[in-house]
Every structure is written in structure tokens, then in C-alpha cells.
Image (spheres, rainbow, N blue to C red):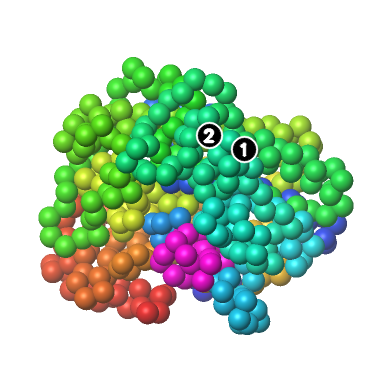
Amino acid sequence: MRLMLLFACLVLAPLVSSAAERPNVLLICVDDLRPELNCFGKSYIRSPNIDALAARGRIFERHYVQAPTCGASRFAMLTGRYGPSDNGALFKRAAQIAKNADSVSASMPAWFRQNGYTTVSVGKVSHHPGGRGGSNWDQEDKLEMPHSWDRHLLPAGPWQHPRGAMHGLAHGEIRHDPSKMDLIQSSEGDDSIYPDGLITDEALRQLDRLSGDDGEQPFFLAVGIIRPHLPFGAPAKYMQPYRDLTLPPISHPEKPSGKTTWHRSGEFMRYNRWGKDPNHDAEFATAVRKHYAACVTYADAQVGKLLERLNQLGQQDNTIIVLWGDHGWHLGEHGIWGKHALFEESLRSPLVICHPGLPNPGVATRSIVESVDIFPTLCSLSGLPQPDFVDGVSLTPILQSADAAGHPAVSYAKAQTLRTDTHRLILHRDGYVELYDHRGEDGETTNIAEKHPELVEAMLQQLRQRVKG
């Protein structure tokens, strides 16, 4: 299937042929964003700006990330390659570059930079907002992605430094001891009272600059929005639509029996929860879900500002726009409040691709795709040479026709998983296997591996072919 997709990409003519005609790229990364959007079928969510983008683009309803954690997922998307499963993945790559740069393949922004693009990142694009290491994530000599960006920026404002902004609450509150920082918050004020307001303002300045003084070259601008990452804080105006709203029930909220990748939601539970546990307190669970929704609407507002400025600058019709969620997030499903598991809720995230001349805009596809596919797809759409070192394939055929075939998706954490059209298989390090049938109502609640040994073996072979180690 993957070879068929690759062949289709080779026979399709590129969108453009010369550097002068190459489109710009706007990549919008949203942290911890599950498909909790109106355009993905969640009608109770207010996401008008992403909905408008989706109406002009292709909605990938079954996009899966490579890892249910920020650093490893962003490694895969930004390199087009499967890689380590931990948050230090990109820093490990940087260390390899320092030892022997020729041994490490180019990242996606580096590839665009090598091919005549001005590359800029603002906010959380790699794992650390601003793309640097050190105790406060701001050391110039500790780059997370060497040779990738002409400018990589994080306006910290009252949060003092990128580490402070990453988990910042209103008016410059920085996380020191998570147990003393509120899990949920809704403060009065404009968008700039939380870090994403400053990130978006800087991104707008960069759009102006890239379209003005820097406009001789096409640009690759990546903007990383932090919310709805924990803690769930957003301006009160974004909470207002949800205050009196009745939410749909949580699907399969029980802790699973048997061996799974279930965990105790440690990232979530270490914040100040006023002694409450959403697994045993329905009212608190609803409050958490509503604050998550408010953060989604706040993030959507930032997307709207970017799209509006792009249009004002006359760049909309010459820009490929990608909106990508770095992984999913459990809101009580399987008794989990967080990511880090290999269930559907951790691994499925939104992907929308919009480009000039897209046939049948607004039509969603049910074809399965992966984050590693984004790199070769943007090369196809931009007329750049195709990288021969990536694990992904171009999604151009699906952009041409929403009914075109996808391919099984691989993900990994403390185990490995393969998601096909109908099933999910999870292989644990000790050889234990989970198998779930997505054609029925049970979803990922009933392990049927023992009943289907032939299917298990066939899927294990597929998984081994795709991921080594």
C-alpha cells in the first residue's frame, strides 16, 4: 500500500515548478489537541476559525501521531522519521549532529531552508518553546534543531523565559511546584494574559516581516500554540459558552482490566485539584472538560488571527496551510486524564491541509495517515525534491481525492502499536499482545487477541517491517 502511494506521488505533477512560483508554508502546531473540534464532529465545541480552514482544506479524520508525548511526536513530524519515544528525542538528534552532522538526515525546516525558503518558528514547534535547552530553555548554545531555523522565537513576557511560558497561567504565573498551581483557571482579560497571546502577536509580526522586507524568498513559518496543554487556563470569555452547556457522556470511562498501557494520569494528578478526582467526582470531571474546551476555543482564536493576517497580506492564495495536533488527550476515557497511552484517544489528533487548487475542499477523508507523512507531502506541494530518507509518504493522492487509500499507522511508547482500517494491535516489550476490533461498539475495551491468532501474526509482521527495535 505504501509503495502504491509513493508511486502515485511520483506520477502526479508537482503543484509548482520553479523557485519563483513556490508557495509559502504556514504550519500551525497545537499542543495536546484531540479531535475536539466542530469540524471533526464535536458540535458542542466552538472552533469557528479552524472550521473555516477545514472548509477550504482536506480534513484527515484518521490521522495518527507516532508517539503520545510531545517531544517524540514532534521529532517524527519534523523529521519524517520514526524515532525515540521520549521527550528528549530532538535533543538526542542534536547531540548526534554535534558529533557527526553528515550522519543525520535533514529536518523538514532544514530541507526547506536548503531549498531557498526562509524558515521561522514561533512558540512551541519542537518540544521546548523557542527550541533551546538549558535550565530555563533559553540557552543559545543548546539548540534543539540545529541548522533548521533562520529565526526561532519565544516571547516570554511576564513568564520570564520559555520554561515559564510552557506551563504559565494568567498574568505571568510560573509553575514551580505543580501541586500549588491550579489545574483549571479562567481569568478575566484579553488574550495576552496567557502565553499564547504573546506567541500569536509575535507570529503576526513575523508574517508581516516575511511578506515585506524578507519577501524575496518563500517562507516556511511554523507557529506552536501551547493550549490546550495543562494547566487548563484561558481567558474567561472563552469559558463563557461552556458554563451552562450539557456535555455528552464520557465514552468507556472505566479503567480497563487486564494488561494495557493504562497509567495513573500522573501529569494531570500532580496539579492542585482541591482534593478532587475526576474519576470519582462527576461534577469535577465536567468542570475539567469544560476548561479543556475553553482552551481549545482560545487556541482556535489564535489560529483565526493568523489566517486573518495571512489574508490581509495577500498571501492566502499562495500559502499551504497545515494545522496539526501533536497527539490526542484522554478526558476520562479508560479512566485516563492525559496522554502517554497507546489507546485511540492518545494517538488520534487533528490534521487539516489546505493548499491552493485543492479539489473538493471541505471534504473529509477516512483514510489512515501518519505524522511522518507531512514532510514528504509539503515537499510534493511545494515542488521541492522529495527526501529519500523519510519513513512517511506524500499524501498528495488523498489531497487529490478523499477516497484514495491510506496506510496503517505505527505508534510507540513503552510498547508498539499498529492501527489498520479495522483493528488496533499493541505489542508489549514482553511479547504480550492486545488486539481490538474497531468495527463494533466495544472499541478498545475488549482484547480479542487470543481468539484471532492468525490476524495477530499478520499484524505483527506488518509492525516488524515498519519499525525496528
Q: Amino acid at mark 2?
A: Gly
Residue 347 occupies quadrant: bottom left
Q: Position of residue 320 (x, y in %)?
A: 67, 49
Q: Residue tagged by mark 2?
A: 172
Mark 2 is surrounded, within 10 Å at the Cα level, by few (under 14), some (14 to 19) or many (20 or more) other residues, namely some
Q: Quadrant of the C terminus?
A: bottom left
Residue 446 occupies quadrant: bottom left
Q: In this view of the protein, which residue sits in the foreground, 116 or 187?
A: 187
Q: Residue tagged by mark 1?
A: 157
Q: Residue shown at 60%/54% (left/top)?
A: 138
> Decide: marks 1, 2 in contact (CB < 8 A)?
yes
Q: Say what secondary structure mark 2 lies in.
A: helix
Task: Examine the structure image and report whether residue 75 is included in the region drawn in magenta.
Answer: yes
Question: In the image, is 353 to the left or to the right of 336?
Answer: right
Question: In the image, is 4 to the left or to the right of 443?
Answer: right
Q: Position of residue 365 (x, y in %)?
A: 48, 49
- What span is colored magenta in the figure? 71-92
Q: Say what secondary structure mark 1 lies in.
A: helix
Q: Which mark is residue 19?
A: none
Q: Position of residue 339 (x, y in %)?
A: 34, 51
